[in-house]
Image (cartoon, grey):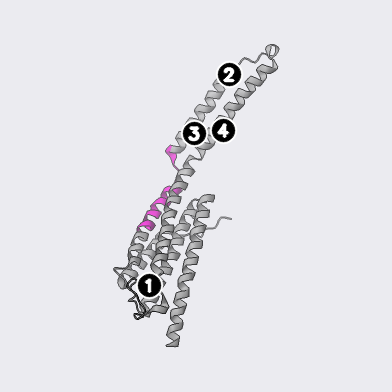
Amino acid sequence: MKSKIRLQPERIISTVERLEKRIADRFPESGLRKNCVEFLEISRLTKQNIEWITKPNIPLRLFSHFIIAIGLGGIIYSVSYVKFEIHDTTIANIVAISEAVFNDIILLGAAIFFLVGMESRRKRKKALTMLNELRVILHVIDMLQLTKDPSLINETLRQTANSPKRSLTKFEMERYLDYSSEMASLVAKIGALYSQSLPDEVVVRSVNEIESLSTGLSRKIWQKIIILNQMDSED
């Protein structure tokens, strides 16, 4: 039985919009906020892509069926002109005719396979393009949280001229990391919309890779949040 429980693009986008506003309230000029704004644009574009993917491409289907009909008609027309005279047929003629017909059938079959799969290939290409954008968003989140080291909060004595600027308090860093983890999770949810609407093997595999990347990133971020909480309890 087909499940009726499905991810709703509108609700996910609404959650991304709220996250962007929350980040803007605390870190308006941060790279995380800029990354979230770009992610929000991709999320809205995803909704349009999902609507396009779920709808059948009628013109393309009609074109494919038209070309297939022409191909079948051409073979039938060609066969109708072949004279099957048993008493004049030799083994060489039978082999030659059989080879010609067999080649035509192979070529027609390849053409039909190409035309029938044309629509799904176009949809797969669009889905994979957007999934790659989501993968980039995750890598940017990872880059932005790299310098958020709980052990170096308010540490200025050991900084060098090339040390990254660290001005966040414990509370601010915890919020920053929490927002990063939440965004990573939402990226995976946006990606899952494509596998939900287009259960193609290649698309599903790409979505699973994004899910694994998101999970690993969230685990890394939450390890830092746990360290922050331990520091609070020690204080």
Identify the amino acid type marked 3: His
Q: Which mark is residue 143?
A: none
Q: Is residue 84 visible?
A: yes
- Mark found first going from the N terminus, 2 or 1: 2
Q: Name the secondary structure under disc 4.
A: helix
Q: Position of residue 22 (x, y in %)?
A: 34, 70
Label 2 belongs to which residue? 80
Q: Amino acid at mark 2?
A: Ser
- The residue that label 3 is drawn on is 65
According to the picture, the residue beneath numbered tag 1 turns out to be 176
- Closer to the camera: disc 4 or disc 1? 1
Which residue lies at the image location 35% right of the left edge and 81% below the top edge?
Answer: 157
Q: Quadrant of residue 179?
A: bottom left
Q: Quadrant of residue 13?
A: bottom left
Structural crowding at the residue carrying mark 3, measured as other residues with C-alpha within 10 Å and reported as few (<14), some (14–19) or many (≥20): some
The answer to whether 86 appears left or right of 29 in the picture is right
Label 4 – label 3 distance at C-alpha:
13 Å
